[in-house]
Image: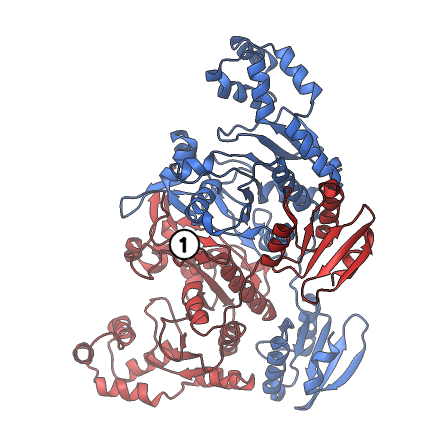
Chain colours: A red, B blue
Amino acid sequence: MERLPGFRDFYPEPLPHTDVWSADARQYIFEQWRTVAKRYGFREYDGPPLEPLELFTTKSGEEIVGQMFNFVDKGDRHIALRPEMTPTLARMVAAHERQYKKPIKWYAIPQLFRYERPGKGRLREHFQLNADLIGETDPAADAELIALLIDTLRVFGLTAADFVIRLSSRNAWQDFFQQGGGDPKNEYEFFQIIDKLERNSPEETEKKLAAMGFSFAKVNEFIEAGKPSPELESILQNLAARGLAEFVKVDYRVIRGLAYYTGVVFEAFDRKGEFRAIAGGGRYNNLVKLISGGKVDLAALGFGMGDVVLLELLKARGLLPKFDAPMNVFVLIEDEKLRGISLKLVQSLRSVGFAVEYPLTPAKADKQFKRAQDLKVLHTVRAESDAYVRIRNLKTREEIVAGFGDVANHLG
Amino acid sequence: MERLPGFRDFYPEPLPHTDVWSADARQYIFEQWRTVAKRYGFREYDGPPLEPLELFTTKSGEEIVGQMFNFVDKGDRHIALRPEMTPTLARMVAAHERQYKKPIKWYAIPQLFRYERPGKGRLREHFQLNADLIGETDPAADAELIALLIDTLRVFGLTAADFVIRLSSRNAWQDFFQQGGGDPKNEYEFFQIIDKLERNSPEETEKKLAAMGFSFAKVNEFIEAGKPSPELESILQNLAARGLAEFVKVDYRVIRGLAYYTGVVFEAFDRKGEFRAIAGGGRYNNLVKLISGGKVDLAALGFGMGDVVLLELLKARGLLPKFDAPMNVFVLIEDEKLRGISLKLVQSLRSVGFAVEYPLTPAKADKQFKRAQDLKVLHTVRAESDAYVRIRNLKTREEIVAGFGDVANHLG
């Protein structure tokens, strides 16, 4: 029986096959994400992977339904597997925000689902670090969140030579649009044209812009100048004070397609341009109000970083560690009369924190030793009697005999 | 907008409301589960939360469909949200078992979904530690897995006064059934009667047993005697050698309803009998063969431990730690001219691993200090110039002045 297309099995390393994924690498990535989030004072939350369909259509319109796993449950509820975390976050914050000090700094590592056309490298699920900062309008909040994004990539060993944050602002484009005499009802469509600059042909873009009364040359001039707006200037200075200037540049070509962004937007890319965006985010000051039906109004911003592109990048840069079974000790049982006392030894070592393996059933001495070597343990331990054990360091080849209660002290 | 009935939101502590769950407690439980599994040499794996419906009906029959979240996707696939992990494990093992040494010792912490009738304490999802040992028929494997179960509960501070593993065996009941002249075609129904002993009335049980030619008195005698079968005797001796005898007792009333168990079965209960089973498992030597369509035949056993009953038990016994925001340092910014240098300080402390908070925007000195106290940081740090900082230990109230590059050394 096969797994569903677009879904992943995660196996322990060493991996048996190239079409499966590493559970160890996944856990490594999650741990690094958590480590950095905690340093920044972000707290973990999570919501259900299933939500009412309406939660997502309220935010993104009915179009999103075609891209989701959705169904009607046995109780006639319209349900969707979450394609993104922000609506759940907005729902949760709106429900209980009074009991948390502002700004709220939260993160989650949800698995997200999209019903995309399957194909090479196109998955229907991925894991995503979501970090959000809620209840602060000052650009200092944007800088804090972008600093978190930068450090979340640096913790894996990535440097300014590997990635850059392209920083932009809906506000800056809004000013450009208004000063150019744009009709307010065309504003969202204008943003869409900018969003597709790098994908569409110049001719098409020029035609579309002209239809709104804008010259492509002027748009390009604005982009090429890349003059930071006041809010971007404030963010750049804040990041420079932290010593993070080299990780960020203003790039007005970034505008992000989603309708709900309201201010600063940004995306993280590998410098060589080999991969899709590593992460993306921005301000969404109206979303909490929208989701809560007007009850709670809180400014917010956040970013999402998926596990798939990050993993590809880390692999390509040789930055993934080797994941062996983290085994410390192998207890040899060469004399079956000593199995009972050997089990006691196994138990006592595990109970003080050592990872211990031993032969479950009678096995030849050389086979046991081979297994100990395969597991890359530092020590083998062998009961000599019910009072003494022989400890061997497989690196130095030193052997010592120790009293039964004294073993752990010799295994440093 | 409300979340779906039977699903949970996980909030950071302190919790805002009694109907929400603690993300910190959840993470604490997962970390303890991982810690003990690693000591026992179990490796982590995971599969997709969505699987072909057929994977579950092959194992459990069509009846299970009524208890699942299942639907037809946009590609006409019959899909189910996983109600248990074992079929996925069997599928994954069957696909790649040749590349792993036997016995395979794997664990996972999946979220599982059941469409149960909603009600007080009845959830439609939970997380479950699944630990399985595959490729070994010897009862030594059963003992190893039960030892893992015991230590997974002990790591939380639970003792033999809090819980016990009730150990039983399908083989022992099979012998009883055959020696009593039972008709092989009634065997599964006989097991079902034993499984419901504690729920059904004695009259009903007596009648049903009599219809198969068995006397209720004889059944009770067998249970009361509780004489370990040879395989159970072997497991008990193994556990006794580890010093774990007090955590386990033979109890033939445990037989577990699921059709696929083939040998030893067990359940963990709180000694006071206040809660439902904490964990349960057993041997399922035929499942890998069934799932793989006969291609791979491997003996196996495993257990599952859910997060909900465990959490209730830990709360009732006062064994859950307090989960504060784990913040180490608060950087005070009392002079806005020093904000730039203060941000540099924040960055340098975070980059060596400290969890650091600071006022995002200008704030009064007393408000900042109050926030530092609320966050229970051990130290406040205040830039005095671009060369010196003042470090205050909030416990001892000691203050020292240190050079900028020397701060981390004083924060031990």
**Is B11 located above or below residue A224 in the figure?**
above
B361 or A294, nearer to the observer? B361
Dot 1: chain letter: A
Q: Which residue is labeled 1 in the image?
A: A8
Residue A123 rendering spot, x and y as whole percentages: 35, 58
Q: Quadrant of residue A101?
A: bottom right
Horizontal side, residue A347 vs residue A373: left or right:
right
**Is B24 located above or below residue A71 in the figure?**
below
**Is B348 located above or below residue B371 in the figure?**
below
Q: Is residue B311 at all visible to an observer of this figure? A: yes
Residue B405 rendering spot, x and y as whole percentages: 68, 86
Q: Quadrant of the C terminus of chain B?
A: bottom right
Residue A185 rendering spot, x and y as whole percentages: 25, 71
Q: Residue at x 48, y 28 (%)?
A: B259
Horizontal side, residue A214 vs residue A335: left or right:
left
Q: Amino acid at mark 1?
A: Arg
Q: Quadrant of residue A328?
A: bottom right
**Is B298 located above or below residue A88 in the figure?**
above
Q: Secondary structure at mark 1?
A: loop
Residue A296 rendering spot, x and y as whole percentages: 48, 60
Horizontal side, residue B110 vs residue B325: left or right:
left
